[in-house]
Every structure is written in structure tokens, then in C-alpha cells.
Image (cartoon, rainbow, N blue to C red):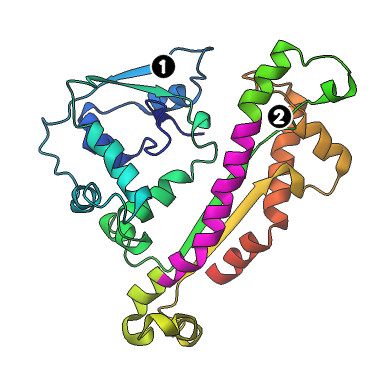
Amino acid sequence: MQPTLQMEPSLPLSVKSLHSSALISCHIPFSRAVTASSAVPGAFSSIILKNYAGTCNYPVPEWATKALDERQVNTRRYHIAKVLSEYQDTTSQPYIHLLDGGISDNLGLRVIINLTHGGGGLMNSLERLDLEKTSKLAIITVNAQTTFDATFNKNDYSIPLLDSLGAVSSIPLDRYTFETMEIVRNNIIEWNESITASRCGEALPSKNSRQVGIANAASACAAQIYLIEMNFDQLEDETERNHLKHLPTSFNLEPDDVDRLKAAAKKILADSVEFNELIDDLQ
């Protein structure tokens, strides 16, 4: 899980977002990011950073300035731009609080989605990172989602308070995670086309012939995106799957459980069709 800025769901902590507040000049230790990623609201304190926006000659991206005037054209881009602009106001936000990213993006994938929507497509984002020669992009998602204990459904009395609180936090998070994965899956084709079109140039002459163009593009320039998903549901062993899905979210797991988690991750990855395709294509 990645840390989240101010509990804001649309601007996960990244190099770009840090630049917007001049925080990157502070040389933030990696340990701070790890601590922020564990800062569950209520259980732990937030990690506090001073907002130095306006002191580092950071130019607000052109797409963000334009998006603020085009709310009805692209609401998602407008929302991302609005959040970015709010961090420029050090009067109302002199400090930035980092909390556990699970409250807004448990998989850490929203930063990719937002970069593509806000930055004019995946290829433009890669170019800004000097990765325009990318031909293969592997996205590995690790979802250690556990099973929500709903044994209260066997009772004919009201749900206990702790179970109610668990439902309030778990159910929305699980559904949001599902929707995030659906957005990524639905964008894979478009992202692949974006990279291929840039690499192949005239191989994709028109929007209406993209699929044909990609199919006929030379192998030297065609791109491939691999979405490699990892979760406990992919384990065939029902006993092992149920055991791991009922492990608590804790800083202290039994050594045997740690070994079983590591073994499960190794097996899930080894059995992944997409992962094996990536390995084969790299050879």
C-alpha cells in the first residue's frame, strides 16, 4: 500500500506530486514512506511534511491549467488538476499529512490511471519519465485481501459494534479495489495502442484502423503490456487458500505463516499465464 496525501483519493504520493509541493528537495528518507504506508488512521499518527510550494519554481503542468477550465469536458482530469492546484496554496495547506494509502488506493494503481488521464495518455507519461523507448510494460498487482468475517449472519440479533466498524471499512475498500482493477483492465488495450502508435509511427495510420494497425505492426516496434494479477483466490489448494485469507492484518505474524505466504506468492507468480508470457518474450 502506498501513502496517501491528506487522505485525498486522487493524488497518491509520487515524485511528481512531491515536486508540486517542493517536498522532493527535502530528501525524504525511504523509511518515512514505509512508515506513512503503515499509518492507519486512528491506530497511528500521520507523517507530517511541510509544504514548500511556490519556493522551487515548479510550473503547474499545462494540462492541469487547461483542465481547470474544462470541468464538463473531462471531469476526472478536472478533479486531478483541482487537487494538484490545492497543494499550491500553502496558506490553507502549510502542512501535508501522510496516511496509510489503503484508505484511498489499496493496490497503488490509481497513480497510473491518474497519470494517463491527467498527462494526456500513457505514452506522454512515459516520455516525461524518459521511458519513450519502452516496448514491454509489466504491471504486477499484489492483492493480499483477506476474507471479511461475516459470521454474524448466523445470528438473529443486531450486528456487534466492532463487526459494524469492520464492515464499514472492509466492504467499501473491497469494492473500490475491484473497480480499480476493472478500470486498469479496460484501459490495457488503449495503453498498448498508445505505446505502439508512438513507436511504430505510420504503422497506425488512423484511429479507425488501430486494431488492424497493431496486428500488422512490425515486431520491432509493437508494444506489449502485461497485467499480472496476484491474489489468494488463484491458489488451487482450498485449505491453504482459506488459511491465508483468514490471516489478520498485523505487524507480527507467526514464522510458519510468513513461510506459507512466501510460498503462496511464489506459486501464484509461477502459475501466472501473463507472467510466463513476459518471461518467454524477454528471452
Placement of the C terminus among the 4 image quadrants: bottom right
Nearer to us in this view, 156 or 263: 156
On screen, residue 174 versus residue 16, left or right, reads right
Nearer to us in this view, 268 or 175: 175
Residue 45 horizontal/vertical position (percent): 44, 12
Q: Is residue 41 magenta?
A: no
Residue 160 horizontal/vertical position (percent): 76, 12
Q: Residues within 10 Å of mark 2 (few under 14, many from 20)?
A: few
- Going 75% across and 49% down the picture, which residue do you hit? 234
Q: Determine which of the numbered discs, if any, sits on residue 65 in the image.
A: none
Q: CA distance from mark 1 to mark 2?
A: 27 Å
Residue 206 horizontal/vertical position (percent): 36, 84
Q: Amino acid at mark 1?
A: Ser
- Going 59% across and 64% down the picture, which residue do you hit? 279
> Which one is earlier in the sequence, the residue at label 1 or at label 2?
1
Q: Label 1: which residue?
A: 46
Residue 274, compared with residue 163, is above or below; it is below
Asked which quadrant contains residue 248, the reply is top right
Residue 84 horizontal/vertical position (percent): 27, 38
Residue 213, compared with residue 177, is above or below; it is below
**What range of the chain is rendered magenta?**
171-193
